[in-house]
């Protein structure tokens, strides 16, 4: 291994270090630009102010947040950060910075203006930017336009490419390829703006902003050279103007596309912002910019051609730092003696057209290929990105013509798709609302409703079942919410639409859409969520934010017909004065309010006031909001696994879990945001807990751990980390990358996020090398050395696994089962078995070196929660030898991160210790049991069953014992006799006892152990239940039962009662009274639901006697499915009755199908 030279730095060095190297993200490089510019101006004796304004949006979603965290630096560098109400008004503000800079009354030597926004924000602001650029930039200030491009719409409603729009506005366009160039080009952009008098744009691709790399700070890196200003014999200097009238306007337009653009071109040339590398005698030329350059270099690297080898490769590359204006002279000189030029750029042709324009009419020009080849056929795709694996397919064909013969084989290998990829139908992880998110309830609409989607977290509803969120018929740009209905309404039969709208969008521009709807007279209900945050982009507070009363007053002034406010906390409105007729209701009234508003003519508004759950959680952690004293907890034995609490809450913390008594539901306490919507589930299994002393966790005692032995390359190695958004995957990646930087590696990384922060998949790639890394920051096929899977499902996704190789990749995977959103709404959805998933992973990895462990269970054992699971996994990878970064560097990186340092250091140690000495880790504790003594006759009946294996015999004894505790020995014997009869019928039908008997036994047990009042009492008095409460919430924890007794329900009680410890004697009495169950003395047994439950037992026995004898080897699976339908009879009261009706319909249909099949046979 090449000797590394360790580095020392603090995280503040990102913005303060003057000379040295720091690991930096593209976004952090953007934040450093104003500080670096201020220091440079100060060193030149200039007192320059800086204004930053814009609007957040991916990939620049966190730019304003990071700026906000640097308030002291902003103040000390005379930087005014003023987020915009929207993009166009922010552009107007930045225009003002240049007017101030040129003003005689300016109190600074100059003012720099920086605008930021995503590409759709640029579209919105074009008119403002056109005016601003016509007016120009001041020579003592300068204006920089930062545009985030999401080319494949990972976190946008539409794909984007901003270069054409910026060019149309007359902006020079810089295109950085990595964080180093983000910083360097940002400084050049300001200098170019000052010199030319133009605003200067910077196209920022997602992979650049979300990427990271080792960045060098050195003032000599960017040494500005100002070229000659003479144009047509005169020295041209632009003067900022705001006089957009003739003849001034005509002169401004002429200079914008004339003299000023020419000065920008000269600046590009003299400062070498475009550079040529490669073979002077080349026949093939490649022209590219930004991420296209990195992707091209990655393809060449896979061919064995490093940047230093290009000089004799037959290939020449022109890397454009500025794509508008294109330096035509440079392109012409580059193209001399070439046979062919390939232009590599994402999306539509822009550079390609400019190159062709530069070469048109010249003698002996090369062929220019881009979106089309020389035959007019599609060449480089224009409708998506061009990652190396895609680029190699086409570029490889052209390279093959110029490479020496001994490299032809390498080119062929690039074109080949790696073999061994097996597509399995596994559960996928998609974005979902956060636990406790207001949208979990506010997006639910009455059956049959039409709904308009829009910009914001509520757009996730487009991925959810329409039965819950309505039929979504429109989605438009930010600020247009509801306006499509103006055009639809006159031509469709429906007469009403619900339109979702966030308060961030309302303040940005959505209020205008409401005004338009009022003016049009359509019937529409705006569902305005007032959640106190622009949650989709990081939780920013909306600029210009009004209170609910202020919004109500504005809406009434606009002419809204009716307004209703709903909230999760009515106490907030005790002393709030609202106009007459504006009601404030509890959120439980959401559905009835929507039904009323849908019948109200005109524009109505439902304001739902509930804070963003994620932001509220952050406030609680920081002591800025009160932490609730109670927790929701489920008695899993009592839970039916019906999913009603998931349906009511739609909450990711309400998680299905498989237990020895079937599928149940558990509240994941670590992720729970204490919204308590789950308590609305029609079920007696919930309790309200007041935690006691902190629950103790087991601590594994370990001795010394030997140093790991690397099993991957140590001079250069690549890591892919996969997991679930919001669980710390990106933080884990940043810690590992920082450790690599501290150890002396060059590091390049990419966080592939999209909507990951909302519970979707997140992927982080990291490259480490002792030499500078020239290729892309995203791993290509077969390039991964360590595949670190923090989530089993995301790790098994074929798209993520494509980087793995069975000769190179070591997998370290958490096998813990973390439910998906679909499992919350449909708890019967099965999580794939770990062994099934491993079958997908092993062929693509070095299976014999890989490690699989239930890391979440290990984290609970060691820490009492799963919050540190990722760091445990990192420790495992270190000890396996697949992450060859010195332990001291990792420990230092954890310290630098500054969050839960001691716990993270211990988690790292726990992971290493597990690999060194694996200790069995029990899965997360399931339900508790209190088995009773079983009478001899029941045990004998179980023992005498013929033809069953011992596993099933043990299972049968287990279930029979529970039925003894449920009722009595005779009841259990009835169950065993039923199983024996079924086994005999199956043996007679197909010759063996197997799947039919097992299925019938499980189903009959479920039907016989129906949960009435007596069983509810018994399961609450099970000692294991209170033990589970103590294990989860600590000694001294107290709880209250949340019950809705059927008797009181029948008398009109419409909510659950909270019953404390004083209610326990009543439970004892009920448990004792279970002996009268089913007799004339059973006062609860007269209820209709109890009569149905008892009848189901007899009905199922009859069904089994009917269908099992009809079994053949051809139809046995169909009969097993019929027998298993009884597992769907879940829930309590009305929910159970609905499931019973569904069960009976399905059984009848299945029997008809079985008979029809038999008739055909």
Image: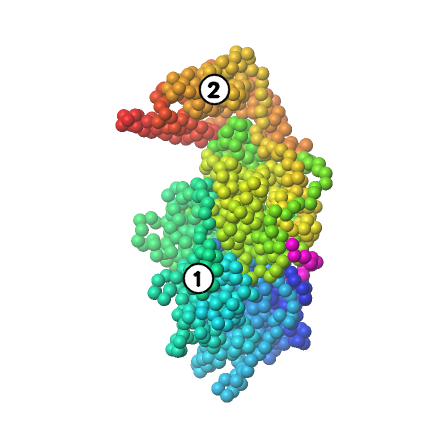
Magenta segment's dominant SS is loop
Left or right of 540 on screen, residue 564: left
Query: Residues under labels 1 and 2: Cα distance?
Result: 66 Å
> Mark 2: which secondary structure?
loop
State whether residue 647 is above or below residue 411: above
Tell me which residue sits at (42%, 30%) in the image: 1139
Q: Residue 1156 occupies which quadrant of the picture?
A: top left
> Mark 1: which secondary structure?
loop
Residue designated by label 2? 948
Q: Do labels 1 and 2 touch, CB within 8 Å?
A: no
Residue 11 inside the magenta-drawn segment: yes
Q: Residues within 10 Å of mark 2 (few under 14, many from 20)?
A: some
Q: Residue 31 occupies which quadrant of the picture?
A: bottom right
Q: Which colour style is shown? A: rainbow
Considering every residue shown, the one lying at the far top of the view is: 937
Residue designated by label 1? 400
The segment highlighted magenta reads 1-14
Left or right of 834 on screen, residue 1120: left
Looking at the image, is mark 1 or mark 2 earlier in the sequence? 1
Q: Residue 365, position in %: x, y?
A: 40, 74
Taking the image as drawn, is residue 980 in sight? yes
Taking the image as drawn, is residue 1096 in sight? no
Residue 298 inside the magenta-drawn segment: no
Tell me which residue sits at (44%, 51%) in the image: 417
State whether residue 794 is above or below residue 716: above
């Amino acid at each position: 291994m090449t000797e590394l030279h360790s580095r020392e730095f603090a995280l503040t060095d990102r913005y303060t270090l003057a000379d040295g190297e720091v690991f930096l993200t593209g976004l952090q490089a953007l934040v450093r630009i104003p500080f670096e510019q201020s220091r440079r101006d100060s060193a030149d004796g200039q007192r320059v102010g800086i204004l930053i304004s814009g609007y957040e949006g991916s990939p620049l979603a966190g730019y304003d947040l990071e700026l906000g965290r640097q308030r002291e630096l902003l103040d000390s560098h005379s930087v005014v950060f003023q987020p915009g109400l929207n993009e166009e008004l922010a552009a107007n503000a930045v225009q003002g910075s240049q007017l101030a800079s040129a003003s005689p009354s300016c109190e600074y030597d100059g003012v720099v203006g920086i605008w930021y926004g995503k590409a759709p924000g640029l579209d919105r602001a074009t008119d403002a930017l056109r005016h601003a650029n016509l007016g120009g930039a001041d020579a003592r200030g300068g204006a920089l336009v930062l545009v985030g491009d999401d080319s494949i719409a990972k976190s946008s409603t539409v794909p984007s490419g901003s270069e054409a729009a910026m060019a149309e506005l007359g902006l020079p366009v810089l295109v950085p390829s990595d964080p180093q160039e983000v910083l360097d080009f940002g400084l050049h952009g300001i200098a170019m703006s000052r010199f030319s008098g133009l605003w200067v744009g910077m196209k920022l691709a997602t992979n650049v902003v979300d990427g990271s790399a080792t960045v060098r700070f050195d003032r000599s890196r960017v040494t500005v050279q100002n070229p000659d200003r003479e144009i047509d014999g005169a020295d041209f200097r632009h003067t900022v103007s705001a006089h957009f009238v003739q003849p001034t306007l005509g002169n401004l337009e002429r200079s914008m596309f004339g003299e000023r653009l020419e000065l920008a071109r000269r600046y590009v040339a003299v400062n070498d912002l475009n550079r040529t590398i490669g073979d002077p005698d080349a026949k093939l030329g490649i022209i590219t910019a930004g991420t296209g350059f990195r992707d091209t270099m990655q393809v060449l690297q896979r061919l064995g051609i490093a940047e230093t080898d290009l000089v004799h490769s037959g290939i020449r590359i022109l890397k454009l730092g500025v794509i508008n204006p294109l330096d035509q002279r440079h392109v012409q000189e580059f193209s001399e003696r070439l046979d062919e030029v390939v232009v590599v750029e994402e999306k539509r042709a822009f550079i390609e057209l400019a190159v062709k324009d530069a070469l048109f009419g010249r003698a002996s020009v090369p062929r220019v290929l881009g979106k089309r080849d020389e035959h007019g056929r599609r060449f480089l795709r224009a409708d998506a990105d061009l990652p190396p694996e895609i680029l190699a397919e086409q570029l490889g064909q052209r390279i093959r013509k110029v490479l020496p013969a001994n490299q032809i084989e390498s080119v062929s290998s690039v074109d080949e798709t790696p073999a061994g990829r097996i597509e399995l139908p596994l559960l996928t992880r998609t974005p979902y609302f956060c636990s406790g998110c207001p949208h979990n309830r506010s997006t639910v609409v009455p059956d049959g409703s039409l709904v308009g989607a829009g910009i914001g977290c509520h757009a996730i509803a487009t991925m959810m079942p329409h039965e819950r969120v309505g039929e979504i018929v429109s989605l438009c740009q930010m600020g247009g919410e509801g306006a499509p209905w103006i055009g639809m309404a006159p031509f469709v039969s429906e007469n009403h639409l619900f339109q979702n709208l966030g308060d961030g969008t309302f303040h940005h521009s959505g209020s205008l859409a409401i005004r338009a709807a009022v003016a049009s007279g359509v019937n529409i209900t705006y569902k305005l969520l007032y959640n106190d945050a622009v949650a989709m982009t990081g939780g920013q507070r909306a600029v210009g934010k009004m209170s609910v009363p202020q919004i109500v007053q504005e809406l009434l002034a606009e002419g809204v017909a009716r307004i209703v406010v709903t909230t999760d906390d009515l106490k907030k409105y005790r002393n709030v004065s609202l106009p007459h007729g504006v009601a404030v209701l509890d959120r439980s009234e959401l559905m009835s309010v929507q039904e009323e508003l849908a019948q109200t003519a005109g524009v109505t508004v439902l304001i739902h006031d509930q804070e963003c759950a994620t932001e509220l959680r952050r406030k609680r952690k920081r002591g800025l909001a009160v932490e609730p004293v109670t927790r929701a907890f489920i008695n899993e034995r009592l839970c039916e696994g019906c999913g009603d609490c998931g349906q009511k809450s739609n909450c990711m913390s309400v998680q299905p879990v498989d237990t020895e008594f079937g599928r149940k539901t558990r509240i994941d306490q670590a992720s729970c945001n204490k919204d308590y919507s789950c308590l609305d589930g029609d079920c007696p299994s919930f309790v309200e807990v007041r935690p006691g002393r902190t629950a103790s966790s087991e601590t594994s005692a370990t001795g010394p751990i030997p140093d790991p032995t690397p099993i991957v390359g140590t001079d250069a190695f690549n890591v892919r980390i996969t997991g679930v958004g919001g669980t710390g995957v990106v933080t884990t990646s940043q810690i590992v990358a920082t450790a690599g930087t501290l150890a002396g590696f060059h590091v390049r990384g990419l966080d592939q996020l999209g909507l990951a922060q909302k519970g979707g998949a997140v992927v982080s790639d990291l490259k480490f090398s002792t030499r500078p890394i020239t290729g892309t920051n995203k791993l290509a096929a077969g390039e991964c050395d360590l595949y670190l899977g923090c989530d089993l499902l995301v790790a098994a996704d074929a798209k993520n696994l494509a980087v793995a190789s069975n000769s190179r990749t070591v997998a370290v995977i958490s096998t813990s089962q973390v439910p998906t959103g679909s499992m919350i709404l449909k708890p019967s959805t099965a999580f794939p078995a770990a062994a099934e998933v491993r079958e997908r992973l092993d062929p693509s990895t070095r299976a014999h070196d890989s490690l699989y462990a239930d890391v979440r269970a290990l984290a609970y054992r060691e820490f009492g929660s799963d919050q540190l699971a990722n760091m445990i996994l990192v420790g495992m990878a270190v000890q396996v030898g697949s992450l060859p970064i010195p332990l001291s560097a990792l420990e230092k990186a954890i310290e630098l991160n500054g969050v839960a340092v001691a716990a993270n250091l211990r988690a790292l140690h726990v992971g290493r210790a597990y690999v060194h000495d694996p200790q069995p880790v029990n899965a997360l504790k399931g339900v508790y049991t209190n088995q009773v003594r079983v009478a001899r006759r029941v045990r004998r009946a179980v023992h005498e069953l013929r033809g069953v294996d011992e596993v099933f015999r043990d299972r049968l004894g287990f279930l029979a014992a529970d039925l003894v505790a449920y009722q009595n020995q005779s009841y259990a014997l009835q169950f065993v006799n039923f199983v024996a009869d079924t086994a005999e019928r199956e043996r007679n039908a197909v010759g063996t006892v197997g799947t039919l008997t097992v299925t019938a036994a499980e189903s009959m047990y479920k039907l016989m152990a129906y949960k009435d009042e007596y069983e509810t009492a018994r399961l609450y008095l099970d000692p294991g239940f209170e033990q589970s409460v103590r294990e989860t919430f600590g000694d001294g924890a107290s709880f209250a039962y949340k019950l809705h007794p059927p008797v009181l329900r029948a008398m009109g009680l419409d909510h659950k009662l909270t019953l404390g410890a004083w209610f326990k004697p009543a439970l004892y009495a009920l448990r004792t009274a279970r002996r009268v169950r089913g007799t004339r003395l059973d006062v609860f047994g007269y209820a209709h639901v109890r009569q149905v439950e008892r009848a189901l037992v007899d009905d199922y026995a009859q069904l089994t006697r009917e269908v099992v004898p009809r079994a053949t080897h051809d139809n046995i699976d169909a009969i097993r499915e019929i027998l298993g339908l009884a597992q769907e009879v879940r829930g309590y009261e009305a929910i159970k009755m609905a499931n019973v009706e569904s069960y009976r319909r399905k059984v009848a249909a299945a029997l008809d199908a079985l008979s029809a099949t038999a008739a055909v046979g």
